[in-house]
Image (cartoon, coloured by chain):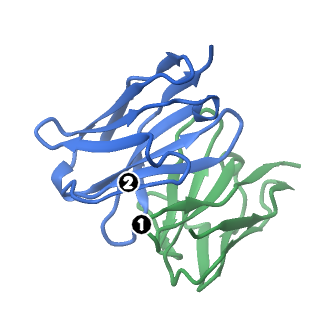
Chain colours: A blue, B green
């Protein structure tokens, strides 16, 4: 059974930094791209970032480019999202998702970790 | 970037109704369109991938169609557990994007 468990969220002041983690199990982690999606309170889903299976390619939404960095550690089956210069508008529930190789859909999701940016 | 729109934004229906949700892309995305269901307080769940392929375990009352820029999700006979929010998502570009969502509630 695929499991994705996010952690690292919390309350952070504007301008601060936070690193989210997503521990994966139940599938061959090295074979799949991984994605972060966020959802602000009461709002819709917004794609944040994707990292390829090899880790060589990374992609970012314009709203986070230059502030967020996605990475992965295949020895730990974990994907990370390093977030800097956090803003109030980054407040959201952050989901980690497994991206399939063929259709590019997100077929497994974690339960999310909440990031609140507030003074 | 590819922009996704959905209509309607909300929809009231009854158990047993047939409902259709529409999704439109700002440019052709071939068949790279996926649908998700999200219940309140829960993570999204993949329903349909590649426009019309049903994810394992998803009831056959869900179906998808379309190509290019226009796509639809149809629920043939609504069940109580189907009242949720539905999102389309394009995977044509590496820069993924979601539609704004359609909230389906009980009439």
Quarter of the image for residue B4 reads bottom right
Query: Picture coordinates of residue B29 (x, y %)?
Result: 53, 80
Can you identify the residue that label 2 sits on? Answer: A50
Quarter of the image for residue A23 reads top left
Q: Please, is residue A4 above or below residue B92 in the view? A: above
Residue drawn 15% across and 35% down?
Answer: A76
Q: Helix, strand or loop at disc 2?
A: strand
- Label ID, residue B13: none
Q: Helix, strand or loop at disc 1?
A: loop
- Label ID, residue B94: 1
Q: Is residue A28 visible?
A: no
Q: A81 left or right of B82? A: left
Other-residue count near label 2 (Cα within 10 Å), few / some / many at <14 / 14–19 / ≥20: many
Query: Picture coordinates of residue B41 (x, y %)?
Result: 61, 32
Q: Is the residue under label 1 in contact with that under label 2 (CB below 8 Å)?
A: yes
Q: Is residue A11 visible?
A: yes
Q: On what subunit does the disc labeled 2 rest?
A: A
The N terminus of chain B lies in quadrant? bottom right
Q: Please, is residue A110 above or below residue B96 in the view? A: above
């Amino acid at each position: 059974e695929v499991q994705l468990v996010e952690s690292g969220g919390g309350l952070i002041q504007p301008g601060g930094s936070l690193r989210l983690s997503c521990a994966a199990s139940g599938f061959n982690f090295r074979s799949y791209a991984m994605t972060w999606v966020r959802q602000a309170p009461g709002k819709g889903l917004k794609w944040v970032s994707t990292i390829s299976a090899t880790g060589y390619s990374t992609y970012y939404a314009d709203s986070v480019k230059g502030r967020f960095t996605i990475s992965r550690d295949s020895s730990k089956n974990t994907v990370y999202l390093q977030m800097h210069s956090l803003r109030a508008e980054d407040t959201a529930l952050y989901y980690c998702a497994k991206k399939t190789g063929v259709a590019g859909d997100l077929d497994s999701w974690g339960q999310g970790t909440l990031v609140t940016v507030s003074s | 970037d590819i922009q996704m729109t959905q209509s309607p934004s909300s929809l009231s229906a009854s158990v047993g109704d047939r409902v259709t949700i529409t999704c439109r892309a700002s440019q052709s995305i071939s068949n790279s369109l996926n649908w998700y269901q999200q219940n309140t307080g829960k993570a999204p769940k993949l329903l349909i991938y590649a426009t019309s392929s049903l994810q394992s375990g998803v009831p056959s009352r869900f179906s998808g169609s379309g190509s290019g820029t226009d796509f639809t999700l149809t629920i043939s006979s609504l069940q109580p557990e189907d009242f949720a929010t539905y999102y389309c998502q394009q995977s044509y570009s590496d820069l993924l994007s979601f539609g704004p969502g359609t909230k389906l509630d009980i009439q």
